[in-house]
Image (spheres, rainbow, N blue to C red):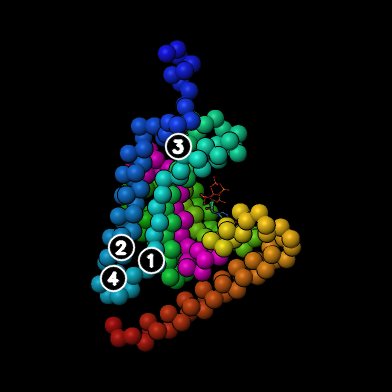
Amino acid sequence: MNEKMESRILPEESIYGADLPEMERILHVLESRVEALREKYRDNDSDPVEHCLGRIKSEQSIREKCRLRGLPETKASALQELHDAIGLRVVCAFLNDVYMMRDYILGFDDIELIQEKDYIKRAKPNGYRSLHLIVRVEGRYLAEIQLRTISMDTWAALEHHMKYKKQVSGNTELLVEELKRCADELASTDLSMQTLRDMIRAEQPL
Ligand code: 0O2
């Protein structure tokens, strides 16, 4: 085998190569931390998390993202240039829980915050809301952690679905407008729900 052949990543090989088991371990560490917090809160019936979803970005998606960004399809691109090969999405019931979860995750010594994108305080023009943390774990692996409420998650799922539905092309402008309106209504509902929960809690005996 010549040198050129050795350095080339064949399509059927994992772009992550020998790092894949370590990446899976890191993902497991992150998931376990969320689970540990949930366990603690479950004791007094106030689990802040509705669900939590972790994934290693699929071979196809990461290669596609490299191509879209004009990056070579290599491990270096996947692990250093892109930052979401390891991804965790934590969906919380209430708005305050999103920020509580943020502080909890960033409170670990082996987590370094690289970038924070608060699309809750500043929603994307299409209405997308979520808090994104790009972190380095154990001084080595980058991970993207998305924190959002159930409403934000529902909206994102629907928007994602519509974006990839080819037949939804008739009245795109109206659809975009309506989606944005729904996102804003859901954001206002999130605020009301938070207020209601605060009121209920204030009335509960200590
Ligand atoms: P997938 O399949 O969900 O992983 P980045 O893509 O992170 O390198 P960018 O564009 O600055 O760089 O990231 P951004 O805007 O923080 O978004 C990253 C991820 O957030 C996306 O990942 C989506 O998961 C989600 N996201 C961002 N904007 C939207 C949106 O308008 N609608 C929906 N439904 N999701 C959004 P990927 O890689 O695009 O996709």
Residue bearing the label numbered 3: 79
Instruction: Return the x and y of residue 29 as percentages of the image width and height.
Output: 31, 49
Callout 3 amino acid: Leu
Residue bearing the label numbered 2: 37
Q: Image quarter for residue 163?
A: bottom right
Residue bearing the label numbered 4: 42
Give the label on residue 49, or none. Answer: 1
* Cα–Cα span, label 4 and label 3: 35 Å
- From which residue to which does the magenta span run? 136-155
Query: Under 8 Å from ligand 1: the CB of mark 1?
Result: no
Crowding near the residue tagged with mark 3, few <14, some 14–19, many ≥20 C-alpha atoms within 10 Å: many
Question: Mark 1 or mark 3, which is nearer the start of the sequence?
Answer: 1
Callout 2 amino acid: Leu
* Cα–Cα span, label 2 and label 3: 28 Å
7 is higher (above) or lower (below) than 171: above
Left or right? Give the position of 74 relative to 41.
right
* Cα–Cα span, label 3 and label 1: 28 Å
